[in-house]
Image (tube, helix red, strand yellow):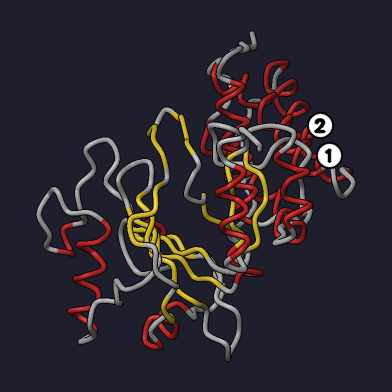
Amino acid sequence: MSTNPTLRYALAAAARGWHVFPLTPGDKVPPRGFDSWEERATTDPATIRRWWARGPFNIGIACGPSGLVVLDLDTPKGGATPPPSLGLPGDADGADVLALVCERAGQPFPTLETFQVRTRRRGTHLYYTAPADGPALRNTEGDKGNGLGWLIDTRAAGGYVVAPGSFVNLPDGTGAYEVVHNAPPAPLPPWLSKRLSTPPAAAPKPVRLALPENRRGNFLRAAINGELDHLAAAKKGQRNRTLYLAATALGQLVAGGALDASEVTTLLEQQGVAIGLTATETRLTVASGLRNGTRRPRTVTA
C-alpha cells in the first residue's frame, strides 16, 4: 500500500469526477515544467498513481473540466478592513461579504448543503456545479472589482483550487485544506450564475517602464526585454518553467531595489497570458518566481 499521504485524496477527488493534477509540495503552483494543467488534469487512476509516485504532491482540481464553480470566501490579510462602502465591522470576512451581497440582491444565502473545504487561512471553499446552459463561467477576483465582492474570489473554467489533503506553507499562511462538509456539490444558484457572467475585462495597457537613459537603465531594459523575448519564444510544454525562471531573474533585481515589483509583475503576467498560459497559472507562477528571486538580491550600479 502506498505511503504517499496525498495520493488517496487525489484518487478520492477523481472518483467524484473531478479532474486533478499535481501541485508543488507545500505550495499552490504546478511543478516546474507541468504546463497546460487544465488540459492534462485527469480522473484516470493509473495516471494519478504514476504522477504521485514521484512525490507527495499537493492536489489541484481543474474546475472547468470538473464542471465546478468554487466560491472562495477568504479572511483578511495583514489587518485589512472592509471598504467603507460595505458598512461591515472591521473583523468581517468573505462569508460576511457574501451574506451582504445576498441581502442587497434580495436573495437567500447559497445553500451550505454542498461540498465545503476549510482553507489554510481559515477561509472556506464552497463547491457548486456549474450551470449546464450558457457560456462557461470564468474566474473572478472580488478585490479587483470583477466578482462578487471584497474577499470573494470564484474559480471556474480556466481556474483551479487547492484540493483537500493538501498542505501549504507560504509566508502569507500555513495550513491544511480540510473537508468540513462532505456532501455532493449543489447547483450554483441561477442569480449567482447571472451575476458572475460578466463581460471580459478590457486588456490592460502594456506597461512601459520609465528607465533612465544611462548605462544602468540600458542594462535593466535589456534584462527585461531579454526575459520577455525568452518567454515569447518558449515552446509549449516549457512555457510555465520559462515564466518561472524569468520571474526569478527579474525578482533578483526587484529584491536589489533596481526594479519595481508591481511593474515587473504586470509585465510578466501580460506576457504569460499572451503566450497561452491561463491568467491563474500565470499569476501563481510569477508570484512563486519572484519569491524565489528575493533569496538572491541583485543590485545594479549606475
> x, y percentage for residue 151?
32, 56
Residue 168 location in percent, x, y? 47, 35
Residue topped by disc 1: 229
Q: Is residue 129 left or right of residue 77?
A: right
Q: Which residue is mark 2?
A: 226
Please tell me whether residue 4 is drawn above or below residue 132 in the rendered image. Answer: above
When the figure is inspected, residue 59 is found, relative to residue 150, above or below; the finding is: above
Q: Position of residue 289 (x, y in %)?
A: 63, 31
Three-letter residue code for mark 2: Gly
Nearest the viewer among 67 and 271 is: 67
Q: Residue 24 vs residue 32: left or right?
A: left
10 Å crowding of disc 2: few (<14), some (14-19), many (20+) = few
Residue sitting farthest toward the front: 1
Tag 2 and tag 1, C-beta contact below 8 Å? yes
In the displayed orientation, state which residue is furthest to the top. 301
Residue type at mark 1 is Asp
Q: Secondary structure at mark 2?
A: helix
What's the CA distance linking mark 2 and mark 1? Answer: 5 Å
